Image: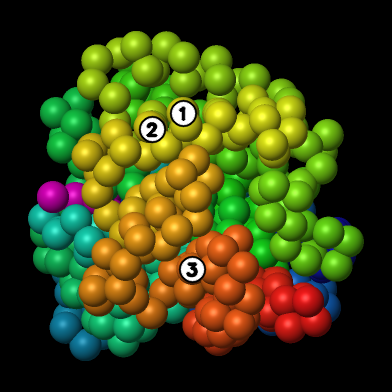
Amino acid sequence: MTKAWGLTSEHLLRELAPQVLGAITRRFRDFASAEDAVQEAMIAAFTQWPQAGIPDNPRGWLIQVASRRMADQARSEIARRERETTVAREAESVTPMLDIDVDMDPHDTLILLFMCCHPALSSSSAIALTLRAVGGLTTAEIANAFLVPEATMAQRISRAKQSIQNSGVPFRLPLPEERTQRLPAVLHVLYLIFNEGYASSIGVHLQRLDLAREAIRLTRNAKALLPDNAEIAGLLALMLLTDARRAARTGPDEELIPLDQQDRRLWDRAEIAEGLELLTPALSKGPVGLYQLQAAIAAVHDEAERAEDTDWPQILALYELLKRVSPGPMVTLNHAIAAAMVHGADQGLQLLKALDADARFADHYRLAAVRAHLLEKMGDYEAAIKHYRVAAAQTTSIPEQNYLMAQAARLAGH
């Protein structure tokens, strides 16, 4: 043991979790049990590493601990069911040594990603399971992303794990035709993991760099696997063009700084350049999809030297196209914002009314927050204060909550 424990160590564990799960699943061919074993290994690390220090080979340490848990379970099953001698030998063959290098497939996490997005699962179940196994999101965070109660999401994930277990899905990179079938779910998972990293839905931190970086890394891997796919390129471009603003999004106390108030000198110009380089050819490859359009919107924002230079008519046109390609409440919300910037706040408020009848979104804090912002632009400060406070009560993100309450307080003293 050499390295001291710290915040970066917690990020390390989150980054290693899907890699370890992939390795254990590949070795033991039992996804559900492997996930339990990896969770126990993570708990052991959280317990032991702060006092003893981080091992020289943390990944190997976690795999060995998880392997022992799997071996213990196998021995228990052998004793109870009198399994064949060969299975017993496999269980006993697990080495007790720590800090040794273990068998590793560089694609373990990507394989796990495609495995969780197996067509045996419904799209929503596949995405939820992958966010849990690969993204490391909590059940509550996933429920927020899906706009459903946490208990509902817990049941969905449990059923998905059982379906994977019963299906006998081989742990390998899918064949080319299988990749095409599973790719939409895979890309949606990566998109949601990045979103949770860029704007955490729960807790005291606005951003979770570990999740955002892992989403970008996995998307790069997916692009290497399918280099000619325009939507993968569009998604990677979207992530880079969005992540480029990360340093400007928070102040010294992690307070939220909205886009129009950010110091654009802090934006990562290298990421913006890479994103634009990916996006330009992606837009010319046939039909334009969901992620290419969102990347194009992000590019318009990034190319404006000042907030007032933003080409809002172009953004509005892109959102109108996005509404046709991939309609949904969040797209409707952002379309309303763009319409307000082009045609006035009253136009945006009219468009928001369509979301009041959407059960998935009527109580979402973003709806109340945008309505408050547009009401403020209309000069209706009393109504704006009310909706800022409603939004603050609805969000589970502390930085978002603090920002919204500060807006209400600012208007109260107007």
Q: Which of marks 2 and 3 precedes in the sequence?
A: 2
Q: In the picture, residue 349 is in which quadrant?
A: bottom left
Could one spot residue 12 in this view of the protein? no
What crowding class fits label 1: few (fewer than 14 Cα within 10 Å), some (14-19), or many (20 or more)?
some
Residues shaded magenta: 114-119
**Residue of label 2:** 318
Position of residue 30 in the picture relative to residue 394 (left or right) = left
Q: Is residue 72 left or right of residue 184?
A: right
**Residue underneath mark 3:** 371
Q: Quadrant of the C terminus?
A: bottom right
Disc 2 marks which amino acid? Leu
Quadrant containing the N terminus is bottom right
Residue under the point 52% across and 35% down: 312
Horizontal and vertical percent for residue 302?
64, 31
Q: Amino acid at mark 3?
A: Arg
Q: Nearer the viewer, residue 50 or 7?
A: 7
Residue 100 vs residue 108, the one in the foreground: 108
